[in-house]
Amino acid sequence: MFGGKTLSYDQNRISIMEKRRLGRTEHMSTVITMGTAGLGKVSQETADSSVDLMMKSGINHIDIAPTYGEAMERLAPWMPKIRSDIFLGSKTKERTKDLAWANIESCLDRLGVDSFDLFQLHAVTTMEELDAVTRPGGALEALIKMREEGLTKWIGITGHGPEVPRVHLEALNRFNFDTIMFPISASIFQNHGYRTKTDELMAEAKNQDVGIQTIKMLSRGGWGIQKKDLSTWYDAHRSKEDIEQALWWVLSQPMHTAPSTGEVTLWSKILEAANNFVPLSESIQEAIITRQQAPNPEPKLGILT
């Protein structure tokens, strides 16, 4: 389900950003989620201005993780003001029930909240990792305990890497996950195998009414030996025109919401592109994929050339 508009948190500005139903959660998420990885690398002042920009743009969905530096501490002062207006997702990279439970308690404390709307198994990128989190005593049991105790409403799984569509397909066979989160970009879709498995994953997610969150929206390649000028671990599109093309391509896929990139200096361009979004025809989407020229490959995302 596409369409709809939302008001900003202080009601002073009206966002024109599209919202989409996040699967069976029924939450109408803005097509851009506040991805907070970048907040953990900046000062509180910069974080405050970045969060304010997002909230005034009508963003109603936040994704955060305990491994994002000081992101939880940067966002915690905002929670009393915005918690009731947002869909809050977090995650754990721990693989056992006991360690994951300790991580969950730490997340609640660091962020200063009583519960999450969504909690996810984080960075499950191989079958071996999927085995670890889903076996008896695995981290999934901690998330189920969370839901039983009212500490989360929904349970999801995330990952990135060339095998993640195949891994998440299997994950949906093993457990009734409410959401998935994995990378797509026009550059990644030059990898035919990744694209084929992604199409299968999205079809199965639709069949099970699973919310689809897509990450690495601006990824175009790796850094190679060139000097990094962004905080993202992959090389990202930077110009207004390239960001618009990359984001419009992502939003033209059958997904629901895309966490913003981990470089806060790009957030204003991302928001502008999202507010101006026009769905692309299949022929234009294919042309964009064909035109991608990665400065360097990034095998960790399946970008091979």
Image: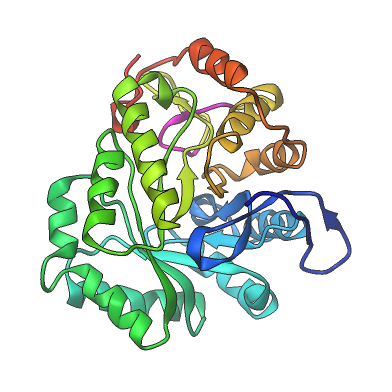
Location of residue 50 by image quarter: bottom right
* Number of numbered tags placed on the structure image: 0
Magenta range: 231-237
Determine if the magenta segment contains residue 92: no
Q: Position of residue 179 (x, y in %)?
A: 42, 58
Instruction: Choose between 87 and 280: the one closer to the eye.
Output: 280
Q: Position of residue 118 (x, y in %)?
A: 45, 69
34 on left or right of 16: left
Q: Position of residue 29 (x, y in %)?
A: 62, 58
Residue 134, relative to residue 18: is it above or below?
below
10 on left or right of 138: right
Instruction: Choose between 42 and 132: the one closer to the eye.
Output: 132
Colour scheme of this structure image? rainbow
SS assignment for the magenta stretch, majority: loop
Q: Residue at x 24, y 37 (%)?
A: 163
Residue 60, relative to residue 250: is it above or below?
below
150 on left or right of 52: left
112 on left or right of 11: left
**Residue located farthest toward the right when viewing the structure as drawn:** 12
Q: Residue at x 48, y 75 (%)?
A: 116
Instruction: Choose between 45 and 138: the one closer to the eye.
Output: 138
Q: Position of residue 277 (x, y in %)?
A: 72, 36
State the quadrant of the C terminus: top left
**Residue located farthest toward the front when viewing the structure as drawn:** 207
Residue 78, relative to residue 36: is it above or below?
below
Location of residue 150 by image quarter: bottom left
Determine if the magenta segment contains residue 233: yes
